[in-house]
């Protein structure tokens, strides 16, 4: 049931078309539809995602299963990301699901426990305002690292989009 449910969630949200940065993420991960994603909601959804892609039901995502998962995430990002959201918080959300991030014991597979236990650190990295939940505000321009257009780590020559005092 979950394997068919998750793709339908992604397809249904495509019709809405993301109206603000992070709206697609919130729509897919906010289980109680209150406009914010808690660690508990994200952990539950990560469990659903794991079940969806654990094709052989062995409790692990192996390299082949992760290829399918990576392709689904890439397609979802391509179809639902707003222009310019290939970096920043939207990309960080996607990167937090990569195999190398979740393979805590570096054995080449990701267990359900590894995948779900990474939830809190994943949410903390996206939570730019530190309130313990993810909202569309956490995806907004000028919030968090990676939103400027400079070159290098704070030594850029480009014009940033952050909220500076001038």
Image: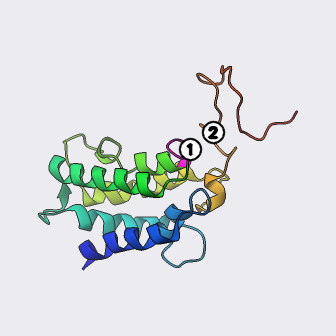
Badge 2 crowding class, 10 Å Cα cut-off, few under 14, some 14 to 19, many 20 or more, is: some
**Image: magenta residue range:** 84-89
Q: CA distance from mark 1 to mark 2?
A: 10 Å
Task: Let me know if residue 47 appears in the view.
Answer: yes
Front label number (1 vs 2): 1
Task: Let me know if residue 41 appears in the view.
Answer: no
Name the residue rendered at 66%, 19% in the picture. 155
Disc on res. 147: 2
**Rendered view: 133 above or below 145:** below
SS at circle 1: loop
Q: Which quarter of the image is occupied by the C terminus?
A: top right
Residue 135, percent from left and from top:
61, 62
SS at circle 2: loop
Residue 17, percent from left and from top:
52, 65
| Tag 1 residue | 84
Q: Residue 160's image quarter?
A: top right
| Render colour scheme | rainbow
- On the rendered structure, is 12 left or right of 33? left
Badge 1 crowding class, 10 Å Cα cut-off, few under 14, some 14 to 19, many 20 or more, is: few
Q: Earlier in the sequence, mark 1 or mark 2?
A: 1
From the image, give the main secondary structure of the stretch colored magenta: loop
Q: Which quarter of the image is occupied by the N terminus?
A: bottom left
Q: Residue 3's image quarter?
A: bottom left
Name the residue rendered at 20%, 48% in the picture. 109
């Amino acid at each position: 049931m979950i394997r068919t449910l998750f793709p339908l969630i992604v397809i249904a949200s495509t019709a809405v078309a993301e109206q603000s940065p992070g709206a697609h993420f919130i729509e897919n991960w906010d289980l109680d539809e209150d406009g914010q994603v808690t660690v508990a909601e994200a952990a539950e959804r990560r469990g659903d995602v794991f079940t969806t892609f654990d094709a052989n039901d062995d409790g692990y995502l192996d390299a082949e299963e992760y290829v399918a998962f990576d392709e689904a995430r890439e397609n979802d990002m391509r179809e639902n990301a707003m222009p310019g959201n290939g970096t920043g918080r939207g990309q960080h959300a996607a990167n937090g699901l990569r195999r190398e991030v979740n393979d805590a014991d570096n054995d080449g597979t990701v267990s359900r426990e590894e995948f779900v236990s990474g939830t809190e650190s994943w949410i903390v990295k996206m939570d730019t305002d530190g309130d313990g939940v993810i909202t569309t505000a956490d995806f907004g321009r000028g919030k968090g690292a990676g939103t400027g257009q400079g070159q290098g780590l704070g030594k850029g020559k480009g014009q940033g989009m952050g909220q500076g005092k001038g």
